[in-house]
Amino acid sequence: MNLLLKEIRHNPLLWLLAFVPVVFAAHKLTPEAHTLLFVLSVLAIVPLAVLLSHATESVAVKTGDAVGGLLNATLGNLTELIIALAALRAGQYALVKASIAGAIVTNSLFMLGAAFLLGGLKHHVQEYNRGNARLQAGLLFLATIALLMPSAVSGADSTAGSAVTDKLSVGLSVLLIAAYGLGLLFTLKTHREFFGGADHADPGEVPWPMGLALTTLAGVTILVALVSEVFIESVQQAAVAFGMTPAFVGFVVVALVGAAAEMASAFAGARKNRLDLSVGIALGSSAQIALFVAPVLVLLSYVIGPAPMNLQFWPGAVIMMLIATMTVSLVTNSGRSAWFVGVLVLLVYLIFAMTLYLLPPRVL
């Protein structure tokens, strides 16, 4: 606990933790002040993301960057899953699908590109495990093909009703979950020797004890989930005040805030020349959302939702996910990175963001 208090005292960014109780109090006292709650929730999530980053790095020192990246992606996506479940219970399926597509695109383009840029500004050339990046890109491509099918069937045959799309979505969800489980077995068990990263850790770093790191991970994840619920409740109304469209909010704002914890870890790892951790977080998070979170939400909609949810996305969303997957496959093929590679990836993301901001789709 002393190490945690010392970290808070010496990191001015963590002083923003004072906004965590403030956002809960404001939500209780003035639940209709959506713009204020939006700003407070963002200010509260930032320091929580920093704490989660430090705790995850400490765990990664003990377990290796491959497991550390998977752990960070899982905990980060747990927050997004909780947010999506709340929207699912309310029947806000458009918001659920927008957040899924936005998270996949944001994690694979913005998070990866920014990590390449930040790491490249400090290190001339960085290397990472090409095999792990190519596997994650392959899993993303598989998921994109699966998400394309319901939209393609519906567009090609107008007689294919919602019943057919729902059945297809359930079958695809089972296949995607099975593929994700087999991918974990392949990378962490049967062929784990091919996916280990090089040790680039700073020898001057003193990681937290495992008990403190795991306790912090659990506690901060719960707090991030609670603050994120306040954020989701206020973001739609606050978006109107800031002139943002629903499409931009779903694909960009919600995805960026939901992935704040993962981004903090990915960026810190890149600056410390631990690019295997950064790549593992960015691509692992995208693959986990596409192969696990989205299918689980489809299956859970039959239990907690007012009606079944399918995997039929707005065509523009599928196109963006496909382009994002192709971009990731292209830039990670060499296993080496420099700052300009990150710039190129970020520009692809900015093209998407600008398009959504100026020309939102009619249907998400």
Image: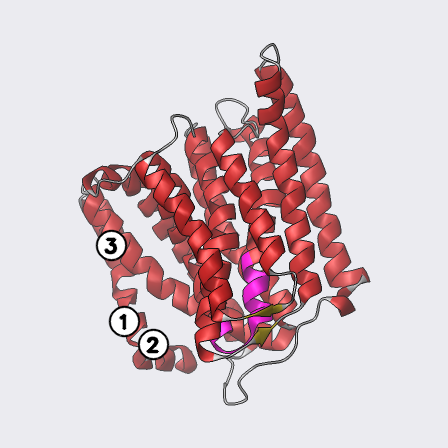
Which amino acid does the dot numbered 3 rest on? Leu
**Disc 1/disc 3 C-alpha distance (Å):** 14 Å
Q: Nearer the viewer, residue 16 or 344?
A: 344
Question: In the picture shown, does residue 71 fall above or below 271?
Answer: above
Query: How far is the residue under mark 2 from the one under mark 1?
Result: 7 Å
Which residue in the protein does label 2 denote?
8
Q: Which residues are magenta?
A: 270-282
The chief SS type of the magenta part is helix
Residue at x 43%, y 54% (from the top left corner): 347
Disc sitting over residue 122 in the figure: none
295 left or right of 135 in image: left
| Picture quadrant where residue 189 is located | bottom right
Where is residue 268? Give x, y as percent. 46, 72
Please determine whether, in this image, residue 126 is positioned above or below residue 181. below
Tell which circle, 3 or 2, labels the residue nearer the N-terminal end: 2
Type of amino acid at the residue the image marks with label 1: Trp
Q: Residue at x 39, y 57 (%)?
A: 223
Amino acid on which disc 2 is placed: Ile
Using residue 16 as the reference point, say whether residue 199 is left or right of it: right
